[in-house]
Structure formats: C-alpha cells, structure tokens
Amino acid sequence: MTRNDFLAHLRTGLKGHVAPSEVNRLCAYYDEMILDLMESGKSEAEAVEAMGSPNELVYAATQSTPTAPQRQHHWLLWTLVILGSPLWGSLAIAAGAMGVCFEIMLWCVPLVGGCTAAGFLIGGGMSVLMSVPAFVAVPFYGITELGVGLACVGGGIIAGWLTFAVIKYCALAHGWAFRSLASQFNKTKEVFA
Amino acid sequence: MKKMRLKTEVVIYSAMYSIFMDSQLKKGLIEYGVLASLAAGDSYGYQLLKNCPPDLGLTQSTLYPLLKRLELDGRVATYAQLHHGRTRNYYHLTALGRQSIRDFVEQWDQVQTVAGFIKRSLENDTQ
C-alpha cells in the first residue's frame, strides 16, 4: 500500500466517526509519521506497514476521541426535514415495500412447495383409501387408483423434502438481508467492509 | 492471625497490581514517559516514539490521543515548523507539564513505600 492509498483509506474510514477537524489532524499526524520513517531510511511500503491497518487506527481513534461529530438539530434542519418529507417519505415507503416484496418472493418458494406437498399427500392418501371400494366395484379401477395414489404420496414426500431443504436457504437469505440492513445502522470495526 | 492478615493484604495488592499495572499505572507511566522525553527539549511524534522506553509499549496510535490530552490539559504546547519542505508538528513541555513531572516524582515515593511493604511481605513469608 502506498502512502497516498493509506491516507485515503484512513480519511475515508475516519469520516463520519470523528469530527472533520480531527480527521485532518489525524491524517496529518500519520502522514508526518510515515515521512519521518521514510527519512530514517525505511521504504514507503515499510513505513506504511509500520503504521498498521487503517481499520485498526480508525477503531483506535474512535475509541480514544469521544468527540464524534454532533449533529445540530436546529430549526432549519427540522424545516428541511418536514418540507422534504414528500420526497424522502415516498422513498422510505418504496424502500419498505421493496423489502416486503423481497420477503414475499423469498417465502413464496417454500409456500408453493409446501402447498404442493400437502396437495399430493392429501390427494394421494385419499386415492389410496378410495381404491378399496373402487377395487370392490371394478378391480381394474381399484388397482389403477391405488397406483396413482401411491405415486401421489411419493411425489408429496419428495416435494416435502425439497421444501424443507429450500426453507433452510430461505432462512439464510432472510438472515443475510436483515444483517446487511442492521449493519448500516451499527457500524463496527470493519469500516471498509 | 497477623500472618493471615498479611497474606490477605498481599493478595489484595497483587490483584491491584495485575489490574492497574496493565491499564491505569501503565497509562500514567506512558504519560509521564512522554513528558520526560519532552523535558530534554522540544520534539516531534516520531522522535518521541523513539525516545520513550520500549517497555512502555508506546505506539503511533496510542501516542496521538495522549499528546492531544496533554495539549488539552495545558501540559504540552504544539507548534508547526518547516522541515525539508514539509510541515512538522513539534511538542513543547509547558511549565504546567514540568510541574506535573515533579508531582509525579513526589508521589512515586509513596508508591515505592507501598511496593517495599509488598516486597517485605514476601520476604517474611515462610511458606
């Protein structure tokens, strides 16, 4: 990593976590350190490496400088929020609707699978039961119905097993989606992740 | 009875040592280590890192908030100076900083008294 890359990473990571004036001071401090190390005989890459990971430095800075940028909620900000509500409100509703659509689409697959499995199992079971009186009346019909019923029960079992397998992946996708959403509000050490 | 009380005190002091040497005491020592480095003359970040005893475990990321705190306390003052065409921040020990070193040295005598007490307890311990 070059000195400029390091400083760019550091600046990007610090933004929003510490006050803007502090961002400049910290970047100047580490830049000075790198240049001093280079002056003492180290190469640019070695000097940058000696600073450590920018992520770690950002984390250390946020832990040691409790002066996070304070948002000023003055009357102008609130006025803009209220006036801009038709725009951000509709966008927020659209984002929420998209989330709901995603969930519906996600759970549609196991729902369809479950319905198919239930249909096959119930229909197959009834067909097997009804094959007895059918066999008494016309033996050929009875045997046919028994065969079709057993095939339906088998299809239902396969559909049920596939649905069960799909549910696992749906739950994983659901968890991933919610974690991704939650991570936007709860930034951790991995600020560049 | 006296021996038991002594042992209890040793346990308490040992626990205090294990807790505070790694955090509070070391933190204080780093602070005064940096101030002591500045007592010899004005210095800059990299030189301060080099001058401080390695046992203190001072790093680039721990030095910055420390210098900032010392600056806010008024124990250190900063000024920028051109060095080979670039700006370098220098740190200067103020009168308040120098006084805080004296206070620390005076308090250190009390710490040594406690340390001596702990040391003697081990010497007297027969078990």
Image (cartoon, rainbow, N blue to C red):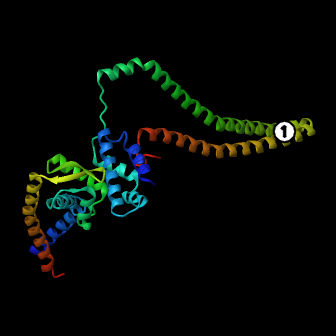
Amino acid, disc 1: Ser
Q: Which residue is drawn at the image coordinates 27% and 43% (left, top)?
A: A66
Residue A21: x percent and y percent?
Answer: 29, 40
Chain letter of mark 1 equals A
Q: Which type of secondary structure does the marked residue at label 1 adopt? A: helix
Q: Give whichever of B24, B30 is nearer the camera.
A: B30
What residue sits 77% from the left and 45% below the top? A154
Q: Position of residue A28 (x, y in %)?
A: 32, 48
Q: Looking at the image, which residue sits at the far front?
A: B85
Residue B82 is left or right of residue A181, and the answer is left
- Residue B18, image x and y in percent? 23, 65
Residue at horizontal 9 percent and vertical 52 percent from the top = B96
Image vertical order of residue A4 relative to residue A104, above or below? below
Give the residue at mark 1: A131
Q: Name the quadrant containing residue A117.
A: top right
Q: Is residue A15 above or below residue A2?
A: above
**Residue B127: x, y in percent?**
19, 81
Dot 1: few (<14), some (14–19), or many (≥20) neighbours within 10 Å?
many
Image quarter where the N terminus of chain B lies is bottom left
Residue B51 occupies quadrant: bottom left
Nearest the viewer among B14 and A13 is A13
In the visual, does A120 lie left or right of B20? right
Q: Residue furthest bottom?
A: B126
Q: How many marks?
A: 1
